[in-house]
Image (cartoon, coloured by chain):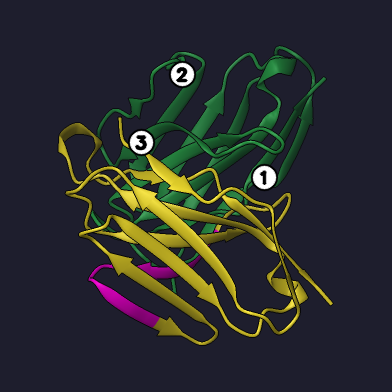
Amino acid sequence: QKEVEQNSGPLSVPEGAIASLNCTYSDRVSQSFFWYRQYSGKSPELIMSIYSNGDKEDGRFTAQLNKASQYVSLLIRDSQPSDSATYLCAVTSDRGSTLGRLYFGRGTQLTVWP
Amino acid sequence: GAVVSQHPSRVICKSGTSVKIECRSLDFQATTMFWYRQFPKQSLMLMATSNEGSKATYEQGVEKDKFLINHASLTLSTLTVTSAHPEDSSFYICSASRGVNQPQHFGDGTRLSIL
């Protein structure tokens, strides 16, 4: 059973702060990792992809991957109220019949207050 | 870009009706498309994985005769909810992927309400 665990929310930060979202996964052979943002009542939107160990930055977002620790994180700098959403960590399956499917965490609900 | 279009966005219909939902990748060829269902305040639940020209692979507990999936081309997949009942009311979302280890790009979803 492949598991993707996210730190339990809700997470509440003031505007301008750094929001830190964490995720661990159980399948050591996974190669691709994604962060999605889902606003209430909407479908998920891809915000970051990361494939190799280290940091990847895109604007205010930084994804961090540590395959040895099976850990992925997302940092949001200068958080804005518009960042308030549920953030989903997703990990690919690289095995057999489930090749290509994504395993999602339950999501962390982030609230950025003005 | 990677745009996935899903139609209709909302359906309200009577119990017993069959409903067809379309999912199109507009600017890329999708080797695989996925269908999810999401109930309020719950996680995404994968229903089936669809590859062009082959039968869909359904997740355990999903009735293949009730949720018919057709993947006729590299840019189009359809989900038909046959003889829908109130318990089928949910938010149905499709996604499309260029290939293994590539991200999935989601459509806007279809909110299905069965009266």
| Residue A40: % across, % down | 73, 52
In this rendering, would A35 be left or right of B102?
A: right
**In the picture, which quadrant includes the C terminus of chain B?**
top right
Write down the residue under mark 2: B62
| Residue B30: % across, % down | 33, 55
Question: Is mark 2 in CB contact (under 8 Å) with mark 1?
Answer: no
| Residue A75: % across, % down | 51, 74
* Residue type indicated by callout 2: Val
Above-or-below relation of B77 to A53: above
Q: Indicate the chain on which mark 2 is placed.
A: B
Q: Is residue B25 visible?
A: no
Q: Dot 2, how many residues are within 10 Å of its Cα: few (below 14), some (14-19), or many (20+)?
A: few
Q: Earlier in the sequence, mark 2 or mark 1?
A: 1
Q: Indicate the chain on which mark 1 is placed.
A: B
The CA span between labels 2 and 3 is 12 Å
Write down the residue under mark 3: B49
Q: Give the chain ID for the yellow colour.
A: A
Write down the residue under mark 1: B8
Occupied quadrant, residue B101: bottom left
Find the magenta span and give its range.
A45-56
| Residue depicted at 79% across the width and 31% down the height | B12
The CA span between labels 2 and 1 is 22 Å
Q: Indicate the chain on which mark 3 is placed.
A: B
| Residue depicted at 50% across the width and 45% down the height | B94
| Residue B93: % across, % down | 56, 43
A105 and B68: which is toward the camera: A105
Q: Earlier in the sequence, mark 3 or mark 1?
A: 1
In this rendering, would A43 be left or right of B47?
A: right
**Colour displayed for chain B in the image of the structure:** green
A84 and B108: which is toward the camera: A84
In this rendering, would B73 be left or right of B87?
A: left
| Residue depicted at 38% across the width and 51% down the height | A24
